[in-house]
Image (spheres, rainbow, N blue to C red):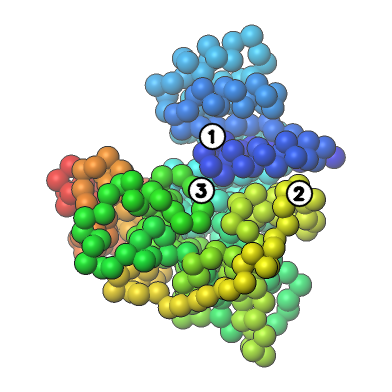
Amino acid sequence: MKQRLAILGSTGSIGVQTLDIVRETPSLFEVRVLTANRNWQRLAAQAREFDADTAVIADERYYGQLRDALAGTDVKVYAGEDAVAQVAAGGDTDVVVNALVGYAGLAPTVAALGAGKKLALANKESLVVGGEYVMRLAAEKRAPILPIDSEHSAIFQCLVGEQSPIRRLIITCSGGAFRDLPCEKLADVTVEQALRHPQWEMGAKITIDSSTLVNKGFEVIEAHWLFGTPVEKITVLLHPQSIVHSMVEFEDGAIKAQLGTPDMRMPISFALMYPRRATRPGERFDFMAHPQLTFAGVDRAKYPALEIACECLRRRGTAACTMNGANEVAVAAFLGRKCAWLDIVRAIEYALGRASFAAAPTLGDYAEANDEARRLAAEYLAL
């Protein structure tokens, strides 16, 4: 029987690669729901190709274009962020792939889990912002969360079948676009430089987050919530080759690692097909082409965002929500050439130093913290 999919953020990098998996194995999947933020042209083309039941455009300004592009088909067309959350909870799907970017992914995550859906999660902000709430809801509804992030997929794969406690999680880090750039040159880096990730092809937002290591800090927070591991037992190692996606060390000293080429289709297919694995076309990993794998510690003076994220995790409450909201505003400003690269982390620090704090937040508290963080970051950046 085919799994019926809702792919949230189908026009972005993860969404497009998820549809690649569907093309490779059409006997296993049926695409029922597709959503996008603004890219109505690609969304319409995807809905036609996969004969989707529903297409949702989050930005209501593009509803008319999407509706007209799908005229003459049976595809139901909706618009608005509330509609995205509603279709995530809809009864006609088995699996929700949340490939949305940023805070916008939280409400659909909550909706999907509240409906007891299997959630294939690429939207790390759902756990960064509201990890305690999200994991409690998943447990109450017995709704499985399968990670799509390559690092968390690797950890999950290393833990499958294990019954003993772990000593630590080891999250690997490519170092982003500026791993080989001296600190004194960071003040003048450009948007174009920051978008040149040395290993992965990703969307603009996550590529910038990789350059500041905000992304890696968020992955530490995500790992804590997914695997119940305290921050003191999570290590980040610089691994420029991006072949070892992450590792788990056990109490007997054994270390398990998951290796492979930098291809997001691997963790996507694993999340969709678990506990089975896909038979995927393409070249196999060649150890002779990668004769040396290297590791190093992270320069935390060069990348202060990593420790800021760890401190937010220690504080719990709305701290990480504040960090995320400020970061989203600052990254958008940098991409819009309205601030310097170094201002991204400075805006985060400014917001965290002035924001209110809720120790046991509700969903409403998260929304208020997000709004406040965005306002404070904009204030710092004079937007």
Quadrant that contains the N terminus: top right
Which tag, 1 or 2, sits closer to the chain's start? 1
Determine the residue positioned at 67% across, 46% down: 117
Secondary element at tag 1: loop
- Looking at the image, which is closer to me, 177 or 357? 177
Quadrant that contains the C terminus: top left
Per the image, the residue denoted by label 3 is 201
332 horizontally vs 255: left or right: left
Residue 257 to residue 101: above or below = below
Secondary element at tag 3: loop
Residue 151 to residue 333: above or below = below
Determine the residue positioned at 59% across, 23% down: 45
Q: Are marks 3 and 2 in contact (CB under 8 Å)?
A: no
Q: How many C-alpha atoms fall within 10 Å of the one at disc 1: few (<14), some, or many (≥20)? A: many
Give the label, 1 or 2, closer to the camera.
Answer: 2
Per the image, the residue denoted by label 2 is 280
Q: Residue furthest bottom?
A: 252
Label 1 is placed on what type of residue?
Thr
